[in-house]
Image (cartoon, grey):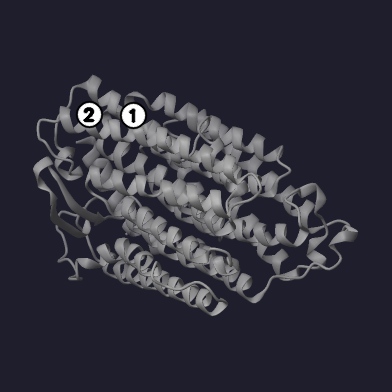
């Protein structure tokens, strides 16, 4: 299948899988979280049992995701694994789940990253039961957003993430955790309020009283109303993405959250913003989207360039990683603004690639910070002499963040540039300059952390442990696999992107 293959005129018979697979991916973590409340947590043996149970739960969700993916590759309808059940029929809302080539790769990414987050949480000793309950609830919220095809259900899962993220940062984060947690909550609630307002306006102004995304897609709205909804949805999703000037919550959260939570924030939570823009703004309000695209392109380019400048000025390693992720999300926004199939394909692929890369960077940065006993890049140096395995993984992570050929981010970034350039001949080169600047920052960071003289107080630094190596090698393997075999995802992504753009152009 070529990248821009036309939509087939005939559809293959769908593969028959139990429809509860998607419900399982969403609700198994929540059920496990409820079960955890009854686990004793007084002794080390109790806490080990809790960790084993949580790890088993995340592997079950991953197994469901892999099973769905093998069935999904043979699907050719708009949505696969659809589930529609009665819920709040009186107000036009139903329990409607489904996935396509845009959401399924991100749902699979979520399943993988929560496994790595659970593995990386092995050092949580105090209040471990509470920690893991919150982490599992967070997984339900993330997976629910990717799977929802009902606006009210979408919003409930969207909002479900706020409390666990706030508590995970506030209770288990760094020395400035309370400030970061409250900033996240305040900005997130503001964005969620705009999202709810947009959904309610759409509900009351549409000729049919329904929250169903598929049903509401076909309704006609006045141009002014469509423009208002487009802006409200965009700002709500841009807060989560995050883009300038809504990014400060993310940078602070990256610096203060526990490493596994920072992994989920950088690898998944910000991707919800990109997913929302592609699914709703581009897929449901494409005509109104085209009318505001000039402002969106400016925001995207400024986000990429500002991220590069801010990253260059950073001395805090964890904040620097936050700006690198923010730069990639600016590219995703540029791709969505272009509304070109090639670029949107690249945006979805880049979100998956950046999720894996961000997870690797966050976990390695946490290991380095723990051993160096500082987050200051200036206070590090010469660590390659003591952390040989860690140095190799850090170099690979930096190359993946740069978009080095053969690694996961390369194809996504290339497709975005190729797809966006014909429509935005000035903005795309400017964004590319930001990408090159971020690449320079990553190379400089590698040199400052790993090479040069080793400070005297770093003389007893040890290399990565077994569990850290398992996480690192696992993530690197996925990054290399996606970089060498991008067609593993691209065929399914492409079909759904073309379908989405065709429907959006209605």
Left or right of 242 in this view: 453: right
Image quadrant containing the N terminus: bottom left
Query: Looking at the image, which is closer to me, 506 or 133?
Result: 133
* Badge 1 element: helix
Rendered position, 334 above or below 354: above
Picture coordinates of residue 234, whole percent (x, y) = 37, 32
Residue in the picture at 44% in, 40% down: 240
Picture coordinates of residue 354, whole percent (x, y) = 51, 53
Query: Looking at the image, which is closer to me, 86 or 35?
Result: 35
Q: Is residue 487 visible?
A: no
Left or right of 296 in this view: 224: left
What number of labels is visible? 2
Farthest residue toward the top? 224
- Give the residue at mark 2: 201
Labelled pair 2, 1 in contact (Cβ < 8 Å): yes
Image quadrant containing the C terminus: top left
Picture coordinates of residue 259, whole percent (x, y) = 59, 57
Query: Looking at the image, which is closer to me, 419 or 106?
Result: 106
Residue in the picture at 87% in, 60% down: 457
Q: Quadrant of residue 211?
A: top left
**Mark found first going from the N terminus, 2 or 1:** 2
Rate crowding at label 1 as few (under 14), some (14 to 19) or many (20 or more) other CA atoms within 10 Å: many
- Give the residue at mark 1: 232
Farthest residue toward the bottom? 45
């Amino acid at each position: 299948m070529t990248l821009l293959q036309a939509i087939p005129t005939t559809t293959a018979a769908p593969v028959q899988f139990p429809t509860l697979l998607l419900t399982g991916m969403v609700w198994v973590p929540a059920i496990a979280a409820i079960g955890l409340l009854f686990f004793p947590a007084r002794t080390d043996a109790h806490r080990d049992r809790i960790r084993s149970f949580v790890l088993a739960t995340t592997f079950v969700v991953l197994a469901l995701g892999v099973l769905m993916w093998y069935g999904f590759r043979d699907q050719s309808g708009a949505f696969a694994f659809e589930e529609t059940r009665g819920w709040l029929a009186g107000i036009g809302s139903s329990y409607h789940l489904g996935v396509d080539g845009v959401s399924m790769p991100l749902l699979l990414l979520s399943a993988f990253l929560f496994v790595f987050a659970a593995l990386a949480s092995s050092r949580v000793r105090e209040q471990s039961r509470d920690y893991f309950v919150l982490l599992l609830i967070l997984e339900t919220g993330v997976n629910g957003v990717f799977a929802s095809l009902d606006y009210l259900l979408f919003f409930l899962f969207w909002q479900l993430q706020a409390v666990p993220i706030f508590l995970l940062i506030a209770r288990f984060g760094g020395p400035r955790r309370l400030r970061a947690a409250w900033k996240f909550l305040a900005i997130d609630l503001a964005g969620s309020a705009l999202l709810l307002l947009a959904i309610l306006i759409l509900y009351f102004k549409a000729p049919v009283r329904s929250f169903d995304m598929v049903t509401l897609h076909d309704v006609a709205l006045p141009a002014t109303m469509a423009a208002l909804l487009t802006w409200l949805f965009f700002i709500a999703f841009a807060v989560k993405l995050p883009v300038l000037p809504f990014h400060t919550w993310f940078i602070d959260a990256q610096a203060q959250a526990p490493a596994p939570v920072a992994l989920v924030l950088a690898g998944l939570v910000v991707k919800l913003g990109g997913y929302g823009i592609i699914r709703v703004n581009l897929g449901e309000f494409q005509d109104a989207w085209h009318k505001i695209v000039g402002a969106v392109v400016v925001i995207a380019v400024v986000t990429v360039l500002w991220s590069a400048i801010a990253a260059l000025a950073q001395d805090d390693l964890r904040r620097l990683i936050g700006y690198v992720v923010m730069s990639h999300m600016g590219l995703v926004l540029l791709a969505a603004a272009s509304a070109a199939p090639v670029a949107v394909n690249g945006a979805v692929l880049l979100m998956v690639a950046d999720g894996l890369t961000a997870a690797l960077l966050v976990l390695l940065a946490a290991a380095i910070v723990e051993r160096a006993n500082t987050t200051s890049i200036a206070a590090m140096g010469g660590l390659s002499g003591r952390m040989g395995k860690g140095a190799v993984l850090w170099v690979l992570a930096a190359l993946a963040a740069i978009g080095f050929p053969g690694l996961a981010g390369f194809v996504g970034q290339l497709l975005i540039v190729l797809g966006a350039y014909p429509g935005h001949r000035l903005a795309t080169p400017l964004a590319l300059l930001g990408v090159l600047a971020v690449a320079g920052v990553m190379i400089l960071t590698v040199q400052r952390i790993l090479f040069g003289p080793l400070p005297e107080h770093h003389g007893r630094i040890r290399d990565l442990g077994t569990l850290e190596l398992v996480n690192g090698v696992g993530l690197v393997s996925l990054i290399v696999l996606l970089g060498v075999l991008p067609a593993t995802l691209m065929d399914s992504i492409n079909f759904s992107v073309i379908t989405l753009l065709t429907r959006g152009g209605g």
